[in-house]
Amino acid sequence: MIILKYICLGVVFLFFLMGGIGHFTQTEQFVAIMPPYMPFHLEAVYVSGVFELLGAFGILWAKSRRIAGLGLFALVIMVTPANIHMWLNAEDFPNFSMTYHYVGLTVQLVLLYVIWWSTKPAETSEVVEA
Protein backbone atom coordinates (compact mmCIF):
# COMPACT_ATOMS: atom_id res chain seq x y z
CA MET A 1 0.00 0.00 0.00
CA ILE A 2 2.92 2.33 0.70
CA ILE A 3 4.21 1.93 -2.86
CA LEU A 4 0.76 2.75 -4.25
CA LYS A 5 0.64 5.86 -2.06
CA TYR A 6 4.04 6.99 -3.39
CA ILE A 7 2.91 6.35 -6.96
CA CYS A 8 -0.23 8.41 -6.37
CA LEU A 9 1.81 11.20 -4.78
CA GLY A 10 4.05 11.15 -7.86
CA VAL A 11 1.05 11.38 -10.19
CA VAL A 12 -0.45 14.25 -8.18
CA PHE A 13 2.93 16.01 -8.10
CA LEU A 14 3.44 15.71 -11.86
CA PHE A 15 -0.16 16.71 -12.63
CA PHE A 16 0.10 19.93 -10.65
CA LEU A 17 3.71 20.65 -11.59
CA MET A 18 2.84 20.49 -15.29
CA GLY A 19 -0.45 22.33 -14.77
CA GLY A 20 1.23 25.04 -12.73
CA ILE A 21 3.90 25.55 -15.36
CA GLY A 22 1.18 25.60 -18.02
CA HIS A 23 -0.47 28.55 -16.30
CA PHE A 24 2.63 30.58 -17.14
CA THR A 25 3.54 29.12 -20.53
CA GLN A 26 0.02 28.76 -21.99
CA THR A 27 -1.68 31.58 -20.14
CA GLU A 28 -3.98 32.52 -23.02
CA GLN A 29 -5.51 29.02 -23.08
CA PHE A 30 -6.31 29.15 -19.38
CA VAL A 31 -7.74 32.66 -19.64
CA ALA A 32 -9.92 31.56 -22.57
CA ILE A 33 -11.70 28.87 -20.55
CA MET A 34 -12.57 31.18 -17.66
CA PRO A 35 -16.32 31.73 -17.30
CA PRO A 36 -17.26 35.31 -18.20
CA TYR A 37 -18.93 35.90 -14.82
CA MET A 38 -15.64 35.35 -12.98
CA PRO A 39 -13.51 38.47 -12.48
CA PHE A 40 -9.79 38.99 -12.98
CA HIS A 41 -9.18 36.21 -15.49
CA LEU A 42 -5.47 36.79 -16.03
CA GLU A 43 -4.77 37.29 -12.34
CA ALA A 44 -6.75 34.17 -11.41
CA VAL A 45 -4.73 32.11 -13.89
CA TYR A 46 -1.45 33.32 -12.43
CA VAL A 47 -2.56 32.90 -8.80
CA SER A 48 -3.91 29.39 -9.42
CA GLY A 49 -0.66 28.52 -11.21
CA VAL A 50 1.35 29.63 -8.19
CA PHE A 51 -0.85 27.57 -5.86
CA GLU A 52 -0.58 24.53 -8.12
CA LEU A 53 3.20 24.73 -7.93
CA LEU A 54 3.22 25.34 -4.18
CA GLY A 55 0.88 22.39 -3.65
CA ALA A 56 2.89 20.13 -5.93
CA PHE A 57 6.08 20.79 -4.03
CA GLY A 58 4.28 20.83 -0.69
CA ILE A 59 3.14 17.22 -1.02
CA LEU A 60 6.73 16.05 -1.37
CA TRP A 61 7.48 16.63 2.33
CA ALA A 62 5.64 14.71 5.02
CA LYS A 63 5.34 17.76 7.30
CA SER A 64 3.52 19.85 4.68
CA ARG A 65 1.83 17.01 2.78
CA ARG A 66 -1.61 17.16 4.40
CA ILE A 67 -2.04 20.93 4.24
CA ALA A 68 -0.73 20.96 0.66
CA GLY A 69 -3.13 18.13 -0.21
CA LEU A 70 -6.06 20.01 1.28
CA GLY A 71 -5.00 23.09 -0.66
CA LEU A 72 -4.83 21.15 -3.93
CA PHE A 73 -8.20 19.54 -3.16
CA ALA A 74 -9.71 23.02 -2.66
CA LEU A 75 -8.02 24.28 -5.82
CA VAL A 76 -9.55 21.49 -7.90
CA ILE A 77 -12.97 22.42 -6.51
CA MET A 78 -12.35 26.09 -7.32
CA VAL A 79 -11.44 25.42 -10.96
CA THR A 80 -14.49 23.23 -11.50
CA PRO A 81 -16.60 26.18 -12.75
CA ALA A 82 -14.18 26.61 -15.67
CA ASN A 83 -14.52 22.94 -16.61
CA ILE A 84 -18.30 23.06 -16.31
CA HIS A 85 -18.36 26.28 -18.34
CA MET A 86 -16.43 24.54 -21.12
CA TRP A 87 -18.81 21.56 -21.00
CA LEU A 88 -21.97 23.70 -21.07
CA ASN A 89 -20.59 25.93 -23.83
CA ALA A 90 -18.83 23.29 -25.90
CA GLU A 91 -19.54 25.19 -29.13
CA ASP A 92 -17.21 27.94 -27.87
CA PHE A 93 -14.39 25.39 -27.54
CA PRO A 94 -14.31 23.51 -30.88
CA ASN A 95 -10.83 22.13 -30.17
CA PHE A 96 -12.27 20.01 -27.34
CA SER A 97 -14.65 17.12 -28.03
CA MET A 98 -17.59 16.26 -25.79
CA THR A 99 -15.71 13.11 -24.88
CA TYR A 100 -12.90 15.33 -23.58
CA HIS A 101 -15.38 17.17 -21.35
CA TYR A 102 -16.93 14.00 -19.95
CA VAL A 103 -13.56 12.37 -19.38
CA GLY A 104 -12.17 15.58 -17.90
CA LEU A 105 -14.94 15.91 -15.34
CA THR A 106 -14.64 12.23 -14.45
CA VAL A 107 -10.87 12.50 -14.09
CA GLN A 108 -11.43 15.50 -11.85
CA LEU A 109 -13.49 13.34 -9.46
CA VAL A 110 -10.82 10.63 -9.48
CA LEU A 111 -8.15 13.28 -8.94
CA LEU A 112 -9.99 14.58 -5.86
CA TYR A 113 -10.01 11.10 -4.36
CA VAL A 114 -6.34 10.47 -5.19
CA ILE A 115 -5.32 13.80 -3.63
CA TRP A 116 -7.33 13.08 -0.49
CA TRP A 117 -6.09 9.50 -0.14
CA SER A 118 -2.43 10.02 -0.96
CA THR A 119 -1.98 13.06 1.27
CA LYS A 120 -3.89 11.93 4.34
CA PRO A 121 -1.80 11.11 7.40
CA ALA A 122 -0.30 7.64 7.46
CA GLU A 123 -2.03 4.94 9.46
CA THR A 124 -0.15 3.84 12.55
CA SER A 125 0.76 0.60 10.76
CA GLU A 126 2.37 2.38 7.82
CA VAL A 127 5.07 4.96 7.57
CA VAL A 128 5.08 7.39 4.65
CA GLU A 129 7.86 9.83 5.34
CA ALA A 130 9.65 11.67 2.61
Image: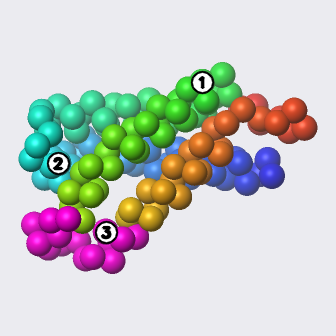
Assign the C terminus to one quadrant of the image: top right
Q: Earlier in the sequence, mark 2 or mark 3?
A: 2
Crowd band around label 3 with a 10 angstrom C-alpha radius: few (<14), some (14–19), many (20+): some
Instruction: State the SS at label 1.
Output: helix
Instruction: State the SS at label 2.
Output: loop
Disc 1 designates what residue?
A: 64
Q: Which mark is residue 34?
A: 2
Q: Are marks 1 and 3 in contact (CB under 8 Å)?
A: no
**Residue with the most extreme right position:** 125
Amino acid at circle 2: Met
Q: Which mark is residue 85?
A: none
Residue 54 is situated, as x and y percent measured from the top left of the image, at: 44, 29
Task: Judge whether 52 appears above or below 22 on screen.
Answer: above
Crowd band around label 2 with a 10 angstrom C-alpha radius: few (<14), some (14–19), many (20+): many
Is residue 50 one of those drawn in magenta?
A: no
Is residue 89 one of those drawn in magenta?
A: yes
Disc 3 designates what residue?
A: 101
Amino acid at circle 1: Ser
